[in-house]
């Protein structure tokens, strides 16, 4: 199976980056996750049209690729704000105060989980696990991991407004 | 056979099984969800947990999954112990967290594996008080209904749909507690086997949409064992009825034929039985060319007059009618006046196939044997569209390579995920040379599309590469020569090579080439299979007699005024021969009498039309393409004047020739007479138990013991409960009372066992899980390989040269539409494409035609307009023609047509 080398939908830059991944993979479909991240880096999220074009490019079905895209909480299948807050809701973070932190963020930003602030600055999402249980509770803001969170620390992070823009791959 | 201990009881279990299989085979009720006998184990649902002990001293043990644990000599398990029981109960509890309390409105209710397992573990009280996840359901087409909220995420659907059936448009979406099984977007499920989701899903996520729309619970269905009439494979089915309507068709387990699965034509095509246009009364055409409904006796008297002494009577039988009906028709008019109902070309192909099956010295495989083939070569067939269930078996055959690899590493075959991951894309070779692309191309080692002439030449080249004594094929292009060599090498190095061809290409040479390849192979376990057009095509070919007049001979007699009365049995002649020739045949034949269960163009030409019972309302014997004679039984009594065709013919015979017909009062007598008169069919009585068969003195009930409302069903007409009809012709009864438990596979109207209301209860009827039905496999194979008779191959085909003036119309069959009866079922009709022609880009460009344009095709005296599809798989000089689709002109074999654009395009 070889990748469809042209796509009218994907940009030349996206195709170049995806082709580079394919060059060291056994089959085009094997780079599905990387390809989704590439498209997301260029477009901010993965729309249905992007998904369909990418599936065709990789020689797989849209259903199969969407199965992968929706499995990972860091692939966005809906538009997101300028930065994404991913608050871990797995068991360790939950024991260490997830509920409190979630209420605090929602209260401060005026949005619930899965929502984007009116100024399009933040999207607030749950994350299944960020792999930092020893420093729970944790969250990601953009590409930065924030650990040992409490309300005070949250306020500082959100107040500073500084973050690394997500999407680097 | 190793001995294992379950709760300290010893059980001898089959070597190589897993513990879940072993428990079920031993009759123990171990709950499970994700395991499926045809799909193996993945250990996903954690439901079949047991405690395994190291040895007799170990009292603590550890939890293991039955489906993931191989049996081993002396292994000790606890199934009933508190640890195992509690574990299983908690699993159900967690699976049920998000499951709605909607059993009363769920189409699965009463035959739900999830209900059964929940009751089995004793999880009776729902303690979860939180909010349940809900999902949006998808439109999945006219066949399958989607209700995602009921999902317990066992993954059986995607494992079946993708891994087993090769579908790509259904997938698990999301993760953890919000997994969603569906398509990427709403739309018709693409797989031709999607309907099996209805039976694979252990709960009500995927249900039978036509049934949902006109619903009856399983326990209220009156059912009968039946045989699919959708193609020649003869899949075993269970037909369920209520209120005189066919409600649904389910798979009937036959380990040698369809195993656990049907195709969607078979599952949904039977609903033509409910078509209100089906004739109900005998109709006599009056002066105004309309039909007057007449009494049955008046119809028989009319027939006696028209067929009486001095009248020259001829009859045309049918490859979609039972052997019994065909035989009685022949008996009535005499063999010299009977034609099997196939035009000359088709009859010749069937006769050729019958001859080859009988004398080629090669096994005609059951579908089970097909699944185990380790190299396959298909010539001229798009199997998914001509013998659909065979395509599903072939998808399993390419996994032979995976099982070989697994055996080397001692991985059990049921370790499904491990075997798949091990094999990745490695498959046993499947080579396809057809007339266009096919639906099996994705698992094929090589595919090519050619004209039938070139398919035959390639086939002979493969045979020559296997056997030096055969003549080499001259002028074969070098790429074809090397392809032939590759195919020959693959077939030669296999243990169980299989060659498949059939009548779809309408080419005697293609069939001959396939047989030559099979003969040239030296393996003992070599196989040769032919795809045939209709449910009883091989049966009527085996019934055929050398003295029989051909179709053209009957046409000649009719046109010469030599036929006073023509009887046509369940056959639309307009699907057999050109319109003008059929019109002349019917016009010149004096009185035309048509017996049919559906209203056809031929019936509209009759002077007398007789309504017959469909497969769901009659008994009969069909011979499948495997030469397996199988019996179908009526699920319900036909309405009004409908009766089985053999019943009409018997009554006619009794009136006209009492001495020859009075000795045949019952169905079994007719079967026996047919067997006695036709040596090739001598064993057909063994196709199914006869009317005298009893189990412990009892008949087999068609109704489950919970069948309800029998007294109320007709109370809007009459408050008195009518006597249940007596069935004198079969061992089945129209009642709830009768034999239960083990019985022959031919007599499984439905499956049910205590505690097992769903179709999973089938294992209670198997000799061991996944094995044959304990009472015997249904059907009898009529042809076993004989000593090979010496054969000579046909003279080599000329090289096909593409012409600019005309294109060769290659018949392309469609699973939905090419079959006469199933296309009348409303749900299937939604999927039937309109008449089409497929052109490759070169031809389309030359003809100035684009996708979606309309083109006019002309050949002989036919002109028809069809829609253009572009398909670059179509060979040069050829065009694909949608075969036998509703509204399409009948395509004679070997038709070369000129093609023009319907409006404003240029001529060829």
Image (spheres, grey):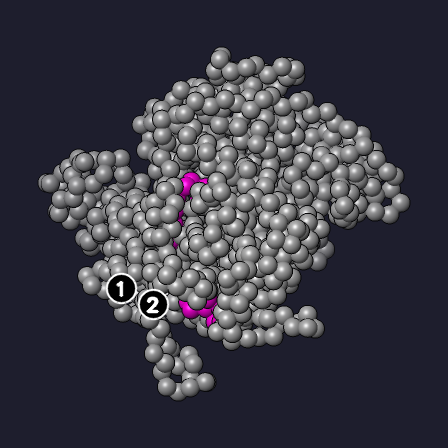
Determine whether the residue tagged by mark 1 lies in a helix, strand or loop. Answer: loop
| Chain part drawn in magenta | B624-643
Q: Is residue B774 visible?
A: yes
Q: Where, by quadrant of the figure, is residue B139 drawn? A: bottom right
Dominant SS in magenta: loop
Q: Residues within 10 Å of mark 1 (few under 14, many from 20)?
A: many
Q: Are marks 2 and 1 in contact (CB under 8 Å)?
A: yes
Q: Is residue B192 visible?
A: no
The chain containing the residue under callout 2 comes to B
Q: Residue at x 30, y 70 (%)?
A: B736
Per the rendering, the mark at residue B699 is 1
Per the rendering, the mark at residue B727 is 2
Determine whether the residue tagged by mark 2 lies in a helix, strand or loop. Answer: loop
What is the residue that sits farthest to the front in this orientation? Answer: B310
Nearer to us in this view, B740 or A111: B740
Confirm whether the magenta stretch covers residue B105: no
């Amino acid at each position: 199976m070889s990748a469809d080398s042209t796509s009218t939908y994907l940009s030349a830059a996206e195709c170049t980056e995806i082709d580079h991944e394919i060059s060291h993979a056994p089959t085009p479909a094997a780079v599905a996750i990387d390809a989704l991240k590439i498209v997301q880096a260029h477009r901010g999220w993965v729309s249905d049209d992007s998904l369909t074009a990418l599936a065709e490019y990789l020689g797989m079905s849209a259903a199969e690729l969407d199965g992968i895209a929706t499995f990972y909480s860091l692939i966005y299948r809906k538009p997101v704000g300028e930065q994404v807050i991913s608050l871990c809701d797995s068991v360790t973070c939950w024991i260490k105060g997830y509920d409190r932190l979630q209420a605090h963020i929602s209260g401060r930003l005026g949005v619930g989980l899965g929502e984007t602030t009116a100024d399009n600055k933040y999207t607030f999402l749950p994350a299944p696990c960020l792999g930092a249980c020893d420093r729970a509770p944790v969250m990601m803001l953009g590409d930065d991991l924030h650990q040992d969170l409490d309300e005070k620390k949250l306020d500082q992070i959100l107040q500073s407004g500084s973050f690394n823009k997500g999407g680097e791959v | 056979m190793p001995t294992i201990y379950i709760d300290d009881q010893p059980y001898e279990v089959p070597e190589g099984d897993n513990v879940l299989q072993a428990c079920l085979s031993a009759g123990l009720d171990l709950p499970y969800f994700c395991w499926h006998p045809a799909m193996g184990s993945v250990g996903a649902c954690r439901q079949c947990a047991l405690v395994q002990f190291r040895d007799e001293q170990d009292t603590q043990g550890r939890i293991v999954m039955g489906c993931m644990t191989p049996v081993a000599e002396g292994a000790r398990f606890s199934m009933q112990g508190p640890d195992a029981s509690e574990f299983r109960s908690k699993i159900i509890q967690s699976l049920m967290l998000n499951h709605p309390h909607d059993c009363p409105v769920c189409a699965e209710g009463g035959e739900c594996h999830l209900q059964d397992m929940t009751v089995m573990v004793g999880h009776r009280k729902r303690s979860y008080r939180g909010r349940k996840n809900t999902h949006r359901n998808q439109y999945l087409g006219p066949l399958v209904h989607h209700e995602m909220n009921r999902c317990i995420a066992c993954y059986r659907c995607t494992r079946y749909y993708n891994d087993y059936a090769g579908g790509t448009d259904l997938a698990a979406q999301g993760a953890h507690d919000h997994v969603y099984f569906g398509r990427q977007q709403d739309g018709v499920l693409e797989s031709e086997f999607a309907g099996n989701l209805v039976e694979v899903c252990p709960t009500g996520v995927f249900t039978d949409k036509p049934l949902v729309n006109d619903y009856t619970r399983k326990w209220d269905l009156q059912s009968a064992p039946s045989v699919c009439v959708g193609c020649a494979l003869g899949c075993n089915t269970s037909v369920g009825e209520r209120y005189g309507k066919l409600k649904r068709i389910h798979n009937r387990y036959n380990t040698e034929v369809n195993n656990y699965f049907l195709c969607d034509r078979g599952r949904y095509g039977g609903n033509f039985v409910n078509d209100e246009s089906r004739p109900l009364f005998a109709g006599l055409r009056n002066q105004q060319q309309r039909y007057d409904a007449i009494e049955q006796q008046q119809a028989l008297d009319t027939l006696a007059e028209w067929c009486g002494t001095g009248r020259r009577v001829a009859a045309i039988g049918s490859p979609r009618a039972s052997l019994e009906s065909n035989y009685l028709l022949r008996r009535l008019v005499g063999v010299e006046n009977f034609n099997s109902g196939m035009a000359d070309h088709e009859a010749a192909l069937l006769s050729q196939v019958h001859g080859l099956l009988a004398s080629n010295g090669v096994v005609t495989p059951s579908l089970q044997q097909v699944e185990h083939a380790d190299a396959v070569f298909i010539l001229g067939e798009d199997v998914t569209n001509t013998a659909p269930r065979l395509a599903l078996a072939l998808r399993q055959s390419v996994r032979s390579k995976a099982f070989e690899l697994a055996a080397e590493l001692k991985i059990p075959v049921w370790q499904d995920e491990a075997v798949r991951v091990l094999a990745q894309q490695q498959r046993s070779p499947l080579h396809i040379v057809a007339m266009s692309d096919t639906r099996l191309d994705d698992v094929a080692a090589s595919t090519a599309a050619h004209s039938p002439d070139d398919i035959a030449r390639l086939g002979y080249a493969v045979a020559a590469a296997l056997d030096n004594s055969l003549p080499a094929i001259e002028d074969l292009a070098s790429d074809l020569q090397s392809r032939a060599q590759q195919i020959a090498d693959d077939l030669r190095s296999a243990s169980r090579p299989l060659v498949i061809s059939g009548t779809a290409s309408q080419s005697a040479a293609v069939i001959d080439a396939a047989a030559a390849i099979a003969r040239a192979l030296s393996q003992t376990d070599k196989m040769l299979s032919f795809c045939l057009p209709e449910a009883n095509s091989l049966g009527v070919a085996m019934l055929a007699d050398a003295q029989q007049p051909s179709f053209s001979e009957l046409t000649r007699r009719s046109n010469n005024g030599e036929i006073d009365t023509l009887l046509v049995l369940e056959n639309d002649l307009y699907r057999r021969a050109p319109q003008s020739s059929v019109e002349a045949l019917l016009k010149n034949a004096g009185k035309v009498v048509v017996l049919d269960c559906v209203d056809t163009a031929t019936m509209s030409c009759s002077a007398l039309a007789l309504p017959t019972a469909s497969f769901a309302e009659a008994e009969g014997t069909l011979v499948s393409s495997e030469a397996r004679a199988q019996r179908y039984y009526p699920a319900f009594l036909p309405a009004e004047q409908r009766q089985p065709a053999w019943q009409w013919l018997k009554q006619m015979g009794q009136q006209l020739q009492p001495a020859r017909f009075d000795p045949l009062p019952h169905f079994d007598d007719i079967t026996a007479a047919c067997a006695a008169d036709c040596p090739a069919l001598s064993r057909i009585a063994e196709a199914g138990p006869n009317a005298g068969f009893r189990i412990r003195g009892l008949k087999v009930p068609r109704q489950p013991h919970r069948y309800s409302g029998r007294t109320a069903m007709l109370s809007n007409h009459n408050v008195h409960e009518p006597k249940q009809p007596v069935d004198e012709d079969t061992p089945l009864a129209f009642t709830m009372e009768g034999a239960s438990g083990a019985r022959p596979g031919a007599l499984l109207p439905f499956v049910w066992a205590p505690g097992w209301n769903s179709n999973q209860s089938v294992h209670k009827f198997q000799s061991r899980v996944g094995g044959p039905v304990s009472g015997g496999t249904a059907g009898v194979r009529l042809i076993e390989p004989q000593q090979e008779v010496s054969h000579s191959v046909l003279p080599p085909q000329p090289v096909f040269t593409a012409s600019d003036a005309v294109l060769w119309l290659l018949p392309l069959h469609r699973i939905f539409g090419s079959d006469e009866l199933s296309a009348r079922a409303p749900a299937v009709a939604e999927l039937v494409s309109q008449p089409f022609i497929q052109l490759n880009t070169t031809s389309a460009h030359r003809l100035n035609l684009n996708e979606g344009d309309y083109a006019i095709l002309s050949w002989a005296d036919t002109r028809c307009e069809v829609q253009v599809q572009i398909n670059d798989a179509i060979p040069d000089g050829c065009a694909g023609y949608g075969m036998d689709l509703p509204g399409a002109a009948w395509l004679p074999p070997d038709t070369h047509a000129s093609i023009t654009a319907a409006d404003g395009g240029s001529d060829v």
